[in-house]
Image (tube, coloured by chain):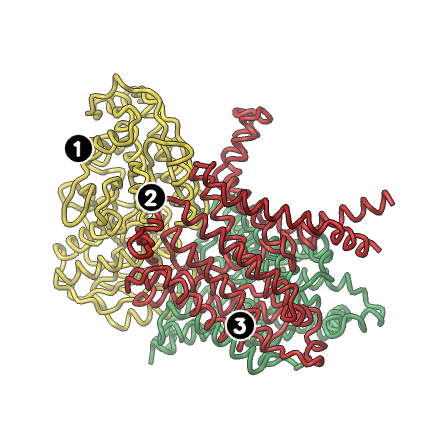
Chain colours: A yellow, B green, C red
Amino acid sequence: MKKLVALLLAVMFVLPAVALAGTVKLGFINSITGPEAPIGENLTNGVTLAIEDLKAKGIDVDLIKEDDTGKPDKSLAAFEKLATRDNVVGIVGPYTSATANADAKLAERYKVPLIVPAASKEEITRQGFKWTFRVSGTTGDYAGVLLDLATTLGKPKTMAILNENTDFGVSGAKSAKEIAQKKGIKVVFEEAYSKGSPDYRSTLAKLKATNPDLVFMVSYVADAILLMRQSREIGLSPMAFLGAGAGFSVAQFAKEKEISNGVFSSTQWTEEAPWAGSKVLFKRYVKQFGKPPTYHAACAYESMMIMGQAAAAAGGDREKTREALTTGKWNGILGEVRFQDYDGYQNQRKAVMLVEQVQNGKHETVWPLKDAVKKPIWPFPGWKK
Amino acid sequence: MIVFFQSLISGILIGGVYALIGIGLTIIFGVMRVINFAHGDILMIGMYLTYFLFTLFHIDPFVSIVITIPLMFLFGAFLQKVFINRALNALPQNQILLTIGIGLVMSNTVMLAFTSDYKILTTTYSSSSVEILGISVSEPLAVSFAITVAITAALYWFLYKTDMGQAIRATAQDREAAQLMGINVKRMSIIAFGIGSALAGTAGALISPTYYIFPQVGSVFTLKAFVITVLGGMGSIVGATLGGVLIGVAESVGGVYIGSGWKDVIVFVLFLLVLLFKPSGLLGTSKD
Amino acid sequence: MNMKTSTADIRGIATLPLLLTAAAIILLFLLPKFVTSTYALHIMILIFISVIMGSAWNILGGYTGQYSVGHAAYFGVGAYTTKILLQYRHIAPWYGVWAGVAAAVATGLVIGSICFRIRGPYFVLASIAVAEIFRVSALNLPGLTNGAEGILITEVPPFKIGNTVITDFMSKVPFYYIGLVIAIAVILATRLVQNSKLGYYFQAIREDQDAAHSLGINLTLYKNAALAISAVFTSLAGSLYGLYVGFIDPGTVLDLGLSVQIVMTCIIGGIGTILGPMIGAVVLVPFSEALRSNMIAQALIDSGLVKEDSPLGTFLKEQLSHAHVLIYGILLVVVILFMPDGILGFIRKLFASKRKETA
């Protein structure tokens, strides 16, 4: 199996850099502790796998890991340390949108290539920066694919948006609203809730009173489960529940099948993703870390693979690494990755998004239809009593 | 109108659990005059205890409180004996910082031991509800509300009808006088902290089936506990009961009509108003 | 007995501390000339900000005895005012900072007039409640504060006098000097307060409010005065932080954790003393940074004390960085139980008992 992986990776490898391979010093910033740590763990593990695979290709990475606890100021300090004290060639990370947005500015100042693996706030790659590259899709991508699905399968007219009041939640909700309006769906309810409240029933009751066709939610896993539980309690049953990645695409959410069945969530990668190596990586991850990976792991894996190869090919030169990232093309578990300028973005990967639906306590890829493993169930079948 | 009653009902039910947290804090404050900033973290320990009793031994959360209560009592007594007792005569701000420190140690030890993953305790009834007149009532919350009422009643009986309860109340009223009357004040403090912790732990157990568990969950409840206690009058058990329900309702109804983001502001403004105009709390005797 | 001898000692060598202070200040001013590591400067700037916050709190908490655990409010108001003006009104920060100070003082007086009626532990709780109201409001007023998304500025406009550019804020050096100057100013202010009539009033309030009141000291006036001075410097620290770090959001500049950290700096160093907050900052900032970036574990391994592949080595490497808040908590508990007067008080006591032994 391992040989197969190595072979696969060798085939994927398109830069003619194998000969130049040696040790490269790279940095990795992540929410290792703090409230975002549960998802952060996926990124760390993804990077760990990437380092192994880089090694198999003859690229030894001297990786320096930094914890930013999910806070921008800590993340800036970490970036600063990596850029000036450790003199890394390039940095992968950080996880959250707020921290990534802050670090992008330092990448520009210190001229250190930065690959943002999983943060989706649109603004990060819309500031004319030359040193920040993003593998992750944007909040617009998340909302877009879900609404594509909704408008293809049904004729929704109204939508309610419920999001956590954080950088991630607010930017997700903004994009959703924009795209909904473009598609002629009226947004009838918008509310940002503060995270960690044990009782969302009253908010959901108010939402239910507006009788929306679609309920669009942006939350992390704990709130995702809570919101769905309480939706069931009060009998909220729209045409579809749409979750913008994050909490809705975690296995823990799917396992709560009483409340998660039928919920759609957009994602960047799944086990069944139509790209070479996805299944292999999924299995390897489960074997090594004892739990299934989220798309974050795949994004972090791919980001580190790209950074490792580009940095090694550039012989550890930051400027050359940046050039390699700007012009290069990679083929891996996220399909073809190129960093492009489009729609006001710079160095942004055009992400191919997938939609999963929880069916029988498992996430099944249901969209786009040509890559679907199972047929989407539409509309929401209602709650079992 | 349905929306109003819906939020009122869920507010009252959640308020029951809040009351339990508040009563625990108020007993601790009453007896020791120590503001316990680790209260939410003690609740968090109760949640983890419940979680593991459920996942490892399949004990239902509502049943497991018979194990949680004595264990949390011992844990609280231990905290009091080892740490808080040493700082009884320290400045109040040092006591606050001490309990903040203890809270940090607790939440971060739990994080190292069990990672910061969210633990979700799913019972068969986690999202069950019954509908009464078009209003859905969460079954687990209704059960926990009933248990809260029972525990509060038992506590009243203990504090008003037993010798030890009388002694605790006497200590709360006047430490020096109680000591002169031959009451072992140190022992009462340990018992009071034990009871306070047991109540917080129970609240954690009761809320587990409908909430989620993570190491930092305590901070959400610590601040609420203060507001509840001050609202009801520091040291007043009836007050804390009432304060808990009031806060539950204020959050829930305010969340609907002002916006769920502003929930906490409503609570804190209420808190400041009480501090200003009735510093002894809604039901407190004005001693200061 | 001891007190007397030690004060006499200090008086006898009063010129020495003065010389030492002067030497330290000169050294600090020259430091960026020798130290080129931006990371070291970064740590120094964080220390300065911590000293400013701690000393500012000390005037209200340490000297006047009003233990506010809500100082994040002034820090946040300062940071937000400066940055909102810069970002949305294009007002240069050297004006914006003063607007921030004015806003913080105004906020302080409103808060003060409400909270100073409350005493003791209730005051602590009230100060927390007020700061939390600010935090939640900032989250829910995106029109003013950009809400949860925070405000990110990519650059501070160059500071010019006439047409000469004094600094373009591209490196850390200008922030270093600004931090240093404000830190010196707040320490100077503390010294002035300590030795002035105002300071005596403050301390009288700290010792016994009722007695102070019966002596004719206007409690509300002087408490608010202490708060105003405190708010000025806390706001400056906030503005400096906001401009230096570049990104602020309610969770960083208005957080309860920040308020606790401010108080902790003072408690660990020694409350109600000039040196206390400095010691606290110098101990806590590098310590928490070293823990966060796993430098301590790395150092233990590099020095050969712990083998990297031994179970302890892997444990330290994997876990110590996770444990930084835990160690913070333990430190807090230990300091309060065993050194209630902070590190400074502990050292003094140590010297005092030694002297006793030799005498």
**Chain of the residue where label 3 is placed in the rendered structure:** B
Residue C160: which quarter of the image? bottom left
Image quadrant holding the N terminus of chain C, namely bottom right
Please, is residue A366 above or below residue A207 in the view? above
Along the viewing direction, whichever of B202 and B258 lies nearer the viewer: B258
Q: With C292 as the anchor, is B99 left or right in this view?
A: right
Q: Residue at x 85, y 44 (%)?
A: C357
Q: Amino acid at mark 2?
A: Leu
> How would you rate the neighbour count of disc 2 (Cα within 10 Å): few for under 14, some for 14-19, many for 20 or more?
many
Give the spatial CA distance, label 3 vs label 1: 61 Å
Of tags 3 and 1, the one toward the viewer is 1
Residue at mark 3 shares a chain with residue at mark 2: no
Evaluate whether residue B246 shows in this view: no
Foreground of the two, B42 or B128? B42
Q: Helix, strand, or loop for circle 2?
A: helix
The quadrant in which the C terminus of chain C is found is top right
Left or right placement of residue C26 versus residue A117 in this view: right
Give me the C-alpha separation between circle 3 and circle 2.
Answer: 47 Å
Could you say where residue B127 lies in the image, as x and y percent from the top left? 39, 61
Q: Which mark is residue B244?
A: 3
Q: Position of residue C194 (x, y in %)?
A: 64, 63
Q: Does dot 3 land on a helix, a strand or a loop? A: helix
Structural crowding at the residue carrying mark 3, measured as other residues with C-alpha within 10 Å and reported as few (<14), some (14–19) or many (≥20): many
Q: Residue B122: percent from the left, percent from the top?
A: 43, 54
Q: Residue most toward the top?
A: A19
Where is mark 2, residue-wise?
A106
- Number of the label disc, if any, that sits on residue A327: 1
Chain of the residue that carries numbered disc 1 in the rendered image:
A
Q: Identify the residue at horizontal 30%, vertical 28% (top origin).
A: A308
**SS at mark 1 in the image:** helix
Q: Name the side, left or right, on which A365 lies relative to A38.
A: left
Q: Is residue A59 visible?
A: yes
